[in-house]
């Protein structure tokens, strides 16, 4: 009698094939893609040396742009569609203004550093990728593709800005143009390291120490020599990554995230992977900011205008008193990627309370939010005591505050440019502004350990985050309610 065993085995193989083949075919591709972070890295374009292509000389910076457009005809058009050019968001509906649609950005709103780019075009426009931003010329300049400053991002050496976004008088335009290449950390850093008025002033996790960092300063840039566009992936000059300070809502597809390359649960220890449900990667892997260069943590405009000697780190006559700190511990808040609120010109304030210029959105009940590290900057800045809203003075340029040290005159001059009435009476009030801390990522062995956040001396304010206490001590799991 013949055995049926071979047929039984063949039947089992057939059943397994029916089960496994669809599983293999339809298994989520992200699981395998993110198991190898290097497979997600963008490919750098092959650079063509321009030293023999660029001829010159160039009489004006616009002539440089015209030469660039001969070979890159769509570049200016692409640039002019981005927020790097417009300095404004797309129109968004604002709930605290009954659904009014507004745009938000450096071009038309205020901050708690130099207060307003509109009042300081002579200096602020040195970080704009355009030429010729004299007061009153903004609309015309935004429409002219020849005013796109290609050298701002692509000149590797020999280029610097002067006033109103124009090249410095000492720049040899042809020599600078011959050095054009893929932007590196130094090129992006000219604005992003020095934003807010100087090196390390604004962000805390972005400063000139990142031009040539050690791996203990930033593991991606130091150990692996990442350039900015490795994470801030760029297509047709649209750079991925939106700034929380200059927006209200941000589309997740426009954001940079760790999971572009890394798995959602990248740890061998499942206890750590469980944390990723509620804790952002940066919370553990960016334990502190301003590791080498100090960052500004407070700015008091009310003390400006005095002849007591300038030293940059504690006092400047044109700006007032500062406090700089190094090795700064972040402030931790729930964050879902957008703002709960962004102060707009004319919004009423309560001067007895600290006003948030921006406030990250998220809470313990928000399933899309995670505990995230922020730099918080405190300022004492001017407001209208009659109107109860923040004021934006004219600071630079002819007759600006930095020339006259006359606040009343600076606010009066600003009325037409800002579209904001001035009652004739001003005071000073405190404000907060926050930036997500995402750079200066540490090697994994230097990430925060359990006892840094949990325990009697842990750095987390659990009750402020919405927990009844430290999850390690009250017996709960580290998850949202």
Image (cartoon, rainbow, N blue to C red):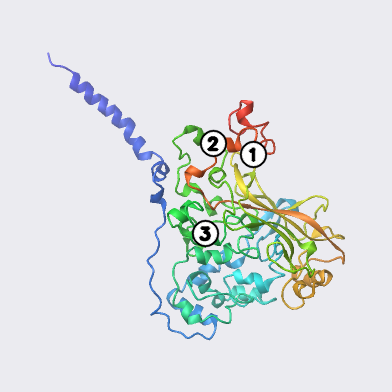
Percent of width and height locating residue 172: 51, 82
The image quarter containing residue 27 is top left
C-alpha separation, residue under disc 1 versus residue under disc 3:
28 Å
**Residue under numbered circle 3:** 210
Residue shown at 58% from the left, 32% from the top: 478
**In this orientation, which residue lies closer to the viewer: 321 or 85?**
321
**Residue under numbered circle 1:** 460
Q: Earlier in the sequence, mark 2 or mark 1?
A: 2
The answer to whether the residues at label 2 and label 1 have Cβ atoms under 8 Å apart is no
Residue 281, relative to residue 406: is it above or below?
A: above
Can you tell which of label 2 and label 3 is closer to the viewer?
3
Circle 1 SS class: loop
Can you see residue 230? yes
C-alpha separation, residue under disc 2 versus residue under disc 3:
29 Å
**In this orientation, which residue lies closer to the viewer: 41 or 71?**
41
Percent of width and height locating residue 386: 87, 60
Circle 3 SS class: helix
Residue 303, relative to residue 68: is it above or below?
A: above
- Image position of 445 (left or right of 247): left
The image quarter containing residue 476 is top right
C-alpha separation, residue under disc 2 versus residue under disc 1:
14 Å
- Image position of 306 (left or right of 459): right
Residue shown at 51% from the left, 44% from the top: 446
**Residue under numbered circle 2:** 275
Percent of width and height locating residue 425: 87, 64
Q: Which mark is residue 402?
A: none
Q: Using a 10 Å C-alpha cutoff, classify the residue at mark 3 as few (fewer than 14 neighbours), some (14 to 19) or many (20 or more).
A: many
């Amino acid at each position: 009698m013949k055995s049926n065993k071979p047929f039984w085995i063949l039947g089992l193989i057939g059943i397994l094939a029916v089960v496994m083949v669809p599983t293999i075919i339809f298994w989520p591709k992200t699981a395998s893609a993110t198991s190898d972070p290097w497979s997600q890295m963008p490919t750098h374009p092959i650079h063509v040396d321009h030293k023999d292509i660029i001829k010159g000389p160039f009489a004006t910076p616009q002539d440089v742009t015209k030469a660039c457009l001969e070979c890159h005809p769509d570049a200016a058009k692409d640039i002019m569609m981005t927020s790097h050019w417009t300095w404004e968001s797309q129109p968004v509906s604002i709930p605290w203004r009954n659904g009014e649609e507004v745009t938000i950005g450096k071009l038309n709103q205020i901050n708690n550093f130099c207060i307003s780019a509109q009042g300081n075009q002579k200096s602020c426009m040195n970080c704009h990728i355009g030429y010729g931003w004299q007061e009153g010329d903004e609309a015309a300049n935004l429409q002219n593709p020849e005013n796109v400053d290609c050298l701002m991002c692509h000149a590797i050496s020999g280029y610097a800005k002067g006033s109103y976004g124009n090249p410095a008088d000492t720049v040899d335009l042809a020599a600078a143009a011959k050095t054009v290449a893929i932007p590196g950390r130094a090129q992006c850093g000219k604005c992003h390291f020095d934003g807010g008025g100087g090196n390390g002033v604004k962000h805390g996790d972005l400063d000139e120490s990142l031009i040539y960092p050690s791996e203990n300063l930033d593991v991606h840039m130091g150990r692996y020599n990442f350039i900015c566009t490795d994470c801030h992936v760029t297509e047709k000059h649209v750079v991925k990554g939106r700034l929380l300070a200059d927006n209200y809502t941000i589309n997740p597809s426009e954001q940079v995230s760790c999971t572009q390359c890394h798995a959602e649960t990248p740890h061998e220890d499942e206890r750590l992977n469980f944390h990723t449900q509620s804790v952002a990667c940066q919370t553990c892997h960016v334990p502190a900011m301003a590791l080498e260069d100090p960052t500004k943590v407070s700015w008091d405009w009310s003390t400006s205008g005095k002849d007591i000697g300038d030293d940059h780190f504690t006092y400047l006559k044109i700006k007032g008193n500062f406090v700089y700190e190094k090795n700064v511990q972040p402030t931790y808040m729930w964050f879902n990627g957008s703002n709960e609120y962004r102060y707009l010109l004319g919004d009423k304030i309560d001067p007895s309370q600290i006003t948030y210029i921006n406030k990250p959105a998220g809470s313990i009940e928000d399933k899309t939010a995670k505990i995230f590290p922020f730099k918080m900057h405190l300022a004492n800045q001017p407001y209208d005591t009659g109107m109860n809203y923040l004021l934006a003075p004219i600071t630079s340029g002819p007759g600006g505050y930095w020339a006259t040290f006359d606040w009343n005159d600076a606010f009066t001059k600003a009325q037409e440019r800002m579209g904001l009435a001035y009652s004739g009476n001003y005071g000073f009030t405190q404000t907060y502004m926050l930036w997500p801390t995402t750079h200066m990522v540490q090697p994994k062995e230097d990430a925060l350990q359990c006892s840094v956040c949990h325990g009697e001396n842990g750095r987390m304010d659990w009750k402020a985050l919405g927990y009844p206490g430290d999850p390690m001590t009250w017996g709960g799991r580290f998850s949202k309610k």
